[in-house]
């Protein structure tokens, strides 16, 4: 270790050397009592520590400290004096001295030097850590009110603001307002309690470009253990967020493909079953009915008509009618021969009118030409599903259906005047989930409105080209 001694008393110099040689491993010394020697020592000797008497012939310890700090911010400087007032000692420590030791308590000097050198190493590590942090992260410091008092270069580079534009503002200057008020309220309650907070922000650059940051906010307390400032360390996670959004979009599209395929398969299966009921089962039932009718006629002419045969005939007739209804429900409507409004009127008549409900369909603002075949079929199945819900649950007397195509949006409103439901009740049954799934296929939206005794309204919107 290289030790520079600024002392004009040879006896004191000798005492210092002997003490340090006995306590330290081969120290090197450079001794001087004038300004030229001091400057030469700083240039050539490059000391690890400087020991200085308070008053020398050409300068004072304060002068020596000032010269040293102009060259080195971290070289330990220890005041070594025969007598010094408390005011002088405090003053020189405040100016950057590492320690002060009275000559009549010289035994403390070796430990003071070792402690100072360890502190220098620690300070150097802190500086390195600070440098590394400033080179890799977005740093901002605020006062207890959230007013920004410091930002690093990366913060300025990413945000596009000059430091002078950010300082004395709060961080809301960059926030995009994506997070709700409760998010910020929880943040503040956390850090004001002295607890570190971790979360994400969507910010805007000065030019209005969005960017995401992952942020840790660390509170620093004052002597009363109350937060006096906050350190925010953020990392730019915009690329990660874009990747997450792309993956979510990909998953969403895959899910839509699955739903579309499943619904298409379901539609095909319904058509097959419908045709089977109509072409095969229904024909068998009709043929059986004819045979029973013939048997009844023959039995009647012979005077031996059987009530059991008549009942069988009536049952077969009911089965035929039910079979036809099922076939109509399962089979896909033919939009080549009939318009969508006509198909919907037939549907509501077969499902609602027959159940005693009054139907009104408003198509004044509707243009069917704006819809493709898949959209028409989806709309038909949605109404069919909601008609089933109304018959089963609504206890309604009237149903109002509105079709609209405006501003590149198709809208269908299905409202009933039934018993409704409480807004706190889960109305997302299987029927509504099926409806939501179909609307999702077309990137549409579903909205429900209801309250007890005030009916139920289903609104769907589908974007159009």
Image: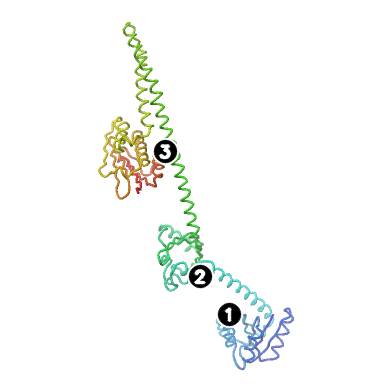
Asked which quadrant contains residue 391, the reply is top left
Considering every residue shown, the one lying at the far left of the view is 364
- What residue is pinned by disc 1? 73
Residue at 49% across / 55% down in the picture?
A: 243
- Quarter of the image where the N terminus is located: bottom right
Asked which quadrant contains residue 183, the reply is bottom left
Whole-percent x, y for residue 121 in the image: 63, 74
- What residue is pinned by disc 3? 430
- What residue is pinned by disc 2? 222
Of the two numbered discs 3 and 2 in the rendering, the one whose residue sits closer to the viewer: 3
Of the two numbered discs 3 and 1 in the rendering, the one whose residue sits closer to the viewer: 3
Q: Secondary structure at mark 3?
A: helix
Please indicate, yes or no, whether residue 307 appears anywhere in the rendered image.
yes
Considering every residue shown, the one lying at the far top of the view is 302
Say which of 455 and 229 sits in front. Answer: 455
Label 3 to label 1: alpha-carbon separation = 73 Å
Against 402, is 279 above or below? above
Q: Is residue 164 left or right of residue 404?
A: right
């Amino acid at each position: 270790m290289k030790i520079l001694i600024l002392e004009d008393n040879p006896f004191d110099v000798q005492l210092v050397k002997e003490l340090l040689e006995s306590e330290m491993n081969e120290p090197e010394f450079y001794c001087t009592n004038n300004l030229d020697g001091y400057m030469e020592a700083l240039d050539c000797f490059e000391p690890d520590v400087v020991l200085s008497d308070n008053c020398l012939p050409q300068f004072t310890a304060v002068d020596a400290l000032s010269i040293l700090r102009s060259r080195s911010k971290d070289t330990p400087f220890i005041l070594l004096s025969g007598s010094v007032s408390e005011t002088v000692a405090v003053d020189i420590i405040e100016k950057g001295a590492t320690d002060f030791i009275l000559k009549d308590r010289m035994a403390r000097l070796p430990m003071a030097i070792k402690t100072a050198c360890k502190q220098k190493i620690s300070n150097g590590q802190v500086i390195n850590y600070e440098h590394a942090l400033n080179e890799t992260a977005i740093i901002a410091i605020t006062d207890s009110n959230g007013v920004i008092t410091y930002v690093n270069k990366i913060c300025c580079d990413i945000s596009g603001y000059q430091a002078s534009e950010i300082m004395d503002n709060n961080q809301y200057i960059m926030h995009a307002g994506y997070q709700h008020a409760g998010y910020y309220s929880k943040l503040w309650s956390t850090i004001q309690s002295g607890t570190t907070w971790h979360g994400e922000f969507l910010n805007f650059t000065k030019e209005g470009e969005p960017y995401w940051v992952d942020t840790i906010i660390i509170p620093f307390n004052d002597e009363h253990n109350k937060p006096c400032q906050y350190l925010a360390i953020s990392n730019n996670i915009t690329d990660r967020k874009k990747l997450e959004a792309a993956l979510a979009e990909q998953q969403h599209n895959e899910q839509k493909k699955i739903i579309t395929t499943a619904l298409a398969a379901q539609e095909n299966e319904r058509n097959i079953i419908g045709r089977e009921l109509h072409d095969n089962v229904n024909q068998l039932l009709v043929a059986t009915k004819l045979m029973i009718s013939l048997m009844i006629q023959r039995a009647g002419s012979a005077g031996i008509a059987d009530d059991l045969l008549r009942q069988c005939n009536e049952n077969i007739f009911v089965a035929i009618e039910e079979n036809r209804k099922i076939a109509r429900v399962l089979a896909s409507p033919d939009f080549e021969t009939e318009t969508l409004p006509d198909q919907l009127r037939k549907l509501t008549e077969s499902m609602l009118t027959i159940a005693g409900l009054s139907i009104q369909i408003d198509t004044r603002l509707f243009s069917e030409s704006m819809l493709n075949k898949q959209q028409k079929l989806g709309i038909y199945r949605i109404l069919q599903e909601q008609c089933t819900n109304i018959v089963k649950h609504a206890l309604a007397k009237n149903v109002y259906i509105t079709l609209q195509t405006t501003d590149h949006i198709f809208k269908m409103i299905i409202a009933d005047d039934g018993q409704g439901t409480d807004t706190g009740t889960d109305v997302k049954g299987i029927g509504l989930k099926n409806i939501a799934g179909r609307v999702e296929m077309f990137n549409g939206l579903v909205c429900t409105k209801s309250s007890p005794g005030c009916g139920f309204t289903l609104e769907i919107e589908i974007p159009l080209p």
